[in-house]
Amino acid sequence: MKSLLNLLFGAIFVFMVVMTIRTGLAVSLRTAWPGYADNPWAMATLYDAYFGFVTFYAWVFYKERSVRATVLWFLLIMGLGNIAMSFYVLIQLFRLKPEEPAAVILRRRPA
């Protein structure tokens, strides 16, 4: 299961980084925004994405013990979205001991 999760979140991370760079080189966000904001479905999708980011961040807030880490991850998640989220999961997976099941990443580690 851990290998499958590493593969999944690794693929999400790489795909999102490549797609973000490729899209950023093709179209400036500043020039794309006026037309984007006029499209109700685009705005609904944007709100949906950010509510998903906040939902994921609630888990990060639960897991992290340091204020610095919670603030840093909030900024990364809100600024980079799924790039930061997939990277966070990969970090959690790589911190697992070999004998620990993947489900351990869901819980907060003892202090």
Image (cartoon, rainbow, N blue to C red):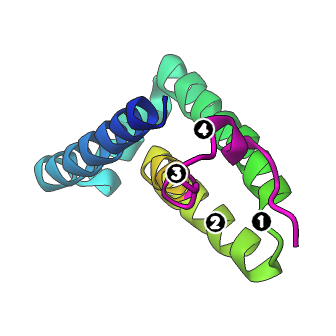
Q: Alpha-carbon distance for marks 1 and 4?
A: 17 Å
Residue named by callout 2? 73
Amino acid residing under circle 3:
Pro
Callout 4 secondary element:
helix
Q: Alpha-carbon distance for marks 4 and 2?
A: 21 Å
Question: Are the residues at dot 2 and dot 1 in contact (C-beta closer than 8 Å)?
Answer: yes
Q: Residues within 10 Å of mark 4 (few under 14, many from 20)?
A: some
Q: Which label sits in the foreground, 1 or 3?
A: 3
- Residues 109 and 59: in front is 109
Please identify the quarter of the rendering in which residue 104 is found: top right
Q: Alpha-carbon distance for marks 1 and 3?
A: 21 Å
Instruction: Judge left or right: residue 16 versus residue 84.
Output: left
Residue named by callout 3? 98
Q: Position of residue 74 (x, y in %)?
A: 68, 63
Q: Position of residue 79 (x, y in %)?
A: 52, 60
Q: Alpha-carbon distance for marks 2 and 1?
A: 9 Å
Please identify the quarter of the rendering in which residue 65 is found: bottom right
Q: Which comes sooner in the sequence, label 1 or label 4?
A: 1
Q: Which comes sooner in the sequence, label 2 or label 3?
A: 2
Residue named by callout 1? 64
- The residue sitting at 57% across, 56% down in the picture is 97
Q: Position of residue 91 (x, y in %)?
A: 51, 59
First to last magenta residue range: 92-111
